[in-house]
Image (spheres, rainbow, N blue to C red):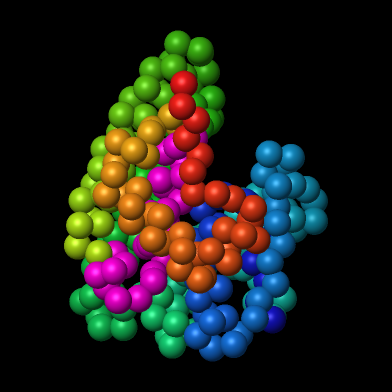
Amino acid sequence: MMKLYYGPGACSFVPHVGLEAIKAATGEDFEAQSVKLHKGEQRTPDYMALNPLGQVPLLVVDGKPLNQIVAICDYLDRRFPQAGLLPAEPWQRAQAMAHFAWMNNTVHPTFTRIFRPGNFVDSDAAQAELKSKALAAFREHLERIQAMTAHAAPFLLGERLSFVDAYALTFLRWGGLAGIDPDTLPAYKAFAEKLAAAPAVAAAMAREGIALETYKKP
């Protein structure tokens, strides 16, 4: 059986949704283990022995660990193509991976600079400036995703739920935590609300104990 180590609300939500979709499509079950990032559980000796990077997600398959979200999702799609989590046609798959890679190597690190500016600069003034610039850039990224939702049919890659959808929902939640009101991104918010009702997404959200709405009005 596969085992996913995830942090509630973290990017590990993306393969978590994928595993729920795979379970629905194939009957292949999985084990899910919560790693409480705010308590530093990702840095415990037992976890570091599995993943020396001290990050989530981590997928263990037949006792073998695999880290990095793109690698995990690529493996899941190739092993369980019936779930349709990425397109099968080569050009469509490449286009999907372009979106996925942008989310992982651009949007995600931008949020990290908002949430943990101290990882990059030392002084309070530098951290405040970095956070401000990163917040503006993150807002622009969310607006680009909102533009993508205009072509959803009904999902971002077409008729079937994908990893790209799960990442999009994650970013809207993170935007709320960063102080971006989802009501200022109405099409994106409406898309995420429909997405949250999809069975695989709803199941992963329930297990993680997370809600779509994270924004707190000032």
Residue drawn at 51 percent across, 71 percent down: 199
| Residue 20 seen | yes
Q: Residue at x 38, y 54 (%)?
A: 192
49 within the magenta span: no
**Image coords of residue 88 (percent x, y):** 31, 83
Residue 141 visible to the viewer: no
Q: Quadrant of the N terminus?
A: bottom right
Position of 152 compared to 127: left or right? left
Question: Which residue: 35% across, 76% down?
Answer: 160
Q: Nearer the viewer, residue 30 or 211?
A: 211
x 42%, y 47%: residue? 171
Q: Quadrant of residue 129?
A: top left
Q: Position of residue 135 (x, y in %)?
A: 36, 29
Give whichever of 217, 70 is nearer the camera. Answer: 217
Decide: is 105 above or below 206. Answer: above
Q: Nearer the viewer, residue 57 or 24?
A: 24
Residue 14 versus residue 217 in the image, above or below: below
Image coordinates of residue 28 in percent, x first then y, are 61, 85
Pick the residue in front: 128 or 209. Answer: 209
Q: Main secondary structure of the magenta part?
A: helix
* Left or right of residue 60, residue 81 in this image: left
How many numbered marks have been drawn onto this rendered protein structure? 0
Tell me where the magenta segment starts and ends, as one range.
153-177
Percent x, y for residue 159? 30, 76
